[in-house]
Image: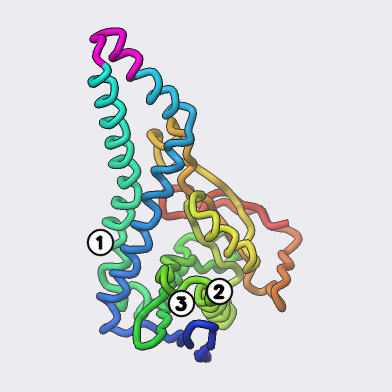
């Protein structure tokens, strides 16, 4: 039986509970806002790539040499930046659209009615401020029972209060109670804070891969696979099994190759 506690922070108390049908609109709003927050970071990352520097330098010079117009050179920089900003939106918009047509289309059906899965929300001051879900991995490695963490998100106004950690702990406890051997997840490499959070909770990086050929040419590895052995977490210390080399499908929604040491 899961126990839900009201936690107190320096800002305001928060409460973690299971998802209810009347939460859907607030959950989707929080999920979409959280994904859109990655767009500026993606744009800034693209600006740091050597290919981008060469393009922003070479294209205006070419325009000046061909036309002799500084105005056209300046306009070319503007249009390149505009194109990059549009491109930075695409992976996140596609991911949101896919989720809204799959697991997030009916959260109750996907998470609450399915065996071995669940979805939680965090409330503070009557407002929904955090979410996380867990679904069983359909084809786990032989001898393993794995739960995949999805959609961890906390409202930007309520970060730094331990809500994300509390949501993860709730999911890990659920995984233990349900007899799962591992919890796995996938995250972009760009939000460094998210990766640091997962690592501090006992997850280990298990792989990194490109989401598409386009993003690989841009030098951006879209996703990192992380895992933790839920049965080996004690008082913040992670002790993983000594054996097992595991492989999972490495498409967009699945973790990639990883090893337990």
The local crowd at label 2, few if under 14, some if 14 to 19, many if 20 or more residues have their Cα within 10 Å, is some
Which residue is tagged 3?
Answer: 116
Please report the bounds of the magenta region as a residue range.
60-69
Q: Nearer the viewer, residue 1 or 202?
A: 202
Say which mark, if any, is on residue 161: none
In the rendered picture of this protein, how many numbered marks are placed on residues? 3
Task: Give the prevailing secondary structure in the magenta stretch.
Answer: helix
Outermost right residue: 242
Q: Which residue is mark 2?
A: 165
SS of the residue at dot 3? loop
Q: Is residue 44 above or below residue 165?
A: above
Q: How crowded is the residue under tag 3: few (<14 C-alpha within 10 Å), some, or many (20+)?
A: some
Element marked by disc 1: loop
219 or 160: nearer the viewer: 160
Mark before the other along the chain sequence, 2 or 1? 1
Marks 1 and 3, the one that precedes in the sequence: 1
* Distance from the alpha carbon under mark 2 to that under mark 3: 21 Å
Q: Which residue is mark 1?
A: 101
Image location of residue 10, percent across then percent down:
54, 83
């Amino acid at each position: 039986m899961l126990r839900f506690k009201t936690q107190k922070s320096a800002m305001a108390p928060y409460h973690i509970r299971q998802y209810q049908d009347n939460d859907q609109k607030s959950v989707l709003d929080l999920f979409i806002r959280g994904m859109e927050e990655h767009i500026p970071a993606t744009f800034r990352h693209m600006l740091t790539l050597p290919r981008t520097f060469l393009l922003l330098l070479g294209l205006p010079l070419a325009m000046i040499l061909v036309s002799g117009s500084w105005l056209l050179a300046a306009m070319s920089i503007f249009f390149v930046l505009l194109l990059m900003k549009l491109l930075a939106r695409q992976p996140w918009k596609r991911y949101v659209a896919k989720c809204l047509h799959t697991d997030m289309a009916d959260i109750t059906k996907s998470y609450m009615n399915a065996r071995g899965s669940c979805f939680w929300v965090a409330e503070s001051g009557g407002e929904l401020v955090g979410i996380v879900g867990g679904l069983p991995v359909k084809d786990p490695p032989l001898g393993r029972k794995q739960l995949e963490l999805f959609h961890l998100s906390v409202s930007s106004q309520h970060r730094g209060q331990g809500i994300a950690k509390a949501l993860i702990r709730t999911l890990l406890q659920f995984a233990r109670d349900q007899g799962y051997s591992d919890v796995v997840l996938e995250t972009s490499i760009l939000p460094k804070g998210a990766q640091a959070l997962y690592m501090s909770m006992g997850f280990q990086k298990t792989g990194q891969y490109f989401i598409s050929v386009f993003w690989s040419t841009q030098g951006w590895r879209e996703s990192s696979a992380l895992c933790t052995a839920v049965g080996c977490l004690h008082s913040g210390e992670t002790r993983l099994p000594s054996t097992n080399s595991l492989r999972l499908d490495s498409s967009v929604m699945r973790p990639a190759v990883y090893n337990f040491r």
